[in-house]
Image (cartoon, helix red, strand yellow):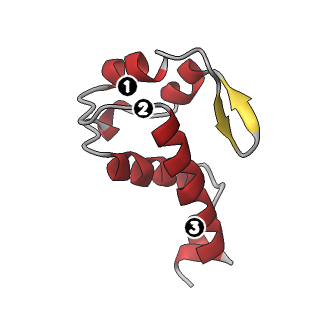
């Protein structure tokens, strides 16, 4: 079940990253905000729409630089786990 959850999360995040047309590396949070807010279109995650500025605010400064799409996805998954959306205890089983 966890594998399906991680796979689903990864796929959704990969699609989101591609549709924002981000350029890597992203050196800092300000650059991330600038790239994410170039489009007024909302960030869709789990079927809900979020303002791009809200989505960028979830990323802490220490996550930068973001070197690639894969790096962005892995850091986003870490955020999802830290917020309890994928239970961390499940990773130990």
Mark 1 surroundings within 10 Å by alpha-carbon count, few (fewer than 14), some (14 through 19), many (20 or more): many
Side of 26 relative to 3 (left or right):
left
Side of 23 relative to 88 (left or right):
left
Percent from the top left, x then y, of residue 54?
58, 23
- Of circles 3 and 2, which is in front? 2
Q: In which quarter of the image is the C terminus?
A: bottom right
Which residue is disc 1 drawn over?
Answer: 32
Closest to the observer, 85 or 26: 26
Kindly check if marks 3 and 2 are in contact, taking CB atoms under 8 A apart as contact.
Answer: no
Per the image, label 3 sits on a secondary structure element best described as helix
Mark 2 surroundings within 10 Å by alpha-carbon count, few (fewer than 14), some (14 through 19), many (20 or more): few
Residue at 34% across / 30% down in the picture?
A: 61
Kindly check if marks 3 and 1 are in contact, taking CB atoms under 8 A apart as contact.
Answer: no
Q: Earlier in the sequence, mark 2 or mark 1?
A: 2
Which residue is disc 2 drawn over?
Answer: 21
Q: Earlier in the sequence, mark 3 or mark 1?
A: 3
Q: Quadrant of residue 43?
A: top right
Q: Is residue 93 above or below residue 9?
A: below
Q: Is residue 33 above or below residue 4?
A: above
Residue at 63% across / 62% down in the picture?
A: 8
Which residue is disc 3 drawn over?
Answer: 7
Q: Which residue lies furthest to the bottom in this view?
A: 93
Mark 3 surroundings within 10 Å by alpha-carbon count, few (fewer than 14), some (14 through 19), many (20 or more): few
Residue at 54% across / 75% down in the picture?
A: 91
Percent from the top left, x then y, of residue 3?
59, 76
Q: Is residue 10 above or below residue 71?
A: below
Per the image, label 2 sits on a secondary structure element best described as loop
């Amino acid at each position: 079940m966890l594998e399906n959850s991680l796979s689903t999360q990864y796929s959704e995040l990969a699609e989101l990253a591609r549709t924002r047309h981000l350029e890597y590396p992203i050196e800092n949070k300000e650059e991330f905000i600038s790239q994410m807010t170039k489009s007024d279109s909302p960030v869709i995650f789990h079927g809900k729409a979020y303002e791009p500025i809200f989505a960028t605010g979830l990323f802490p400064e220490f996550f930068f630089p973001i070197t690639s799409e894969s790096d962005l996805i892995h850091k986003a998954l870490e955020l999802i786990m830290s917020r309890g959306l994928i239970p961390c205890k499940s990773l130990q089983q």
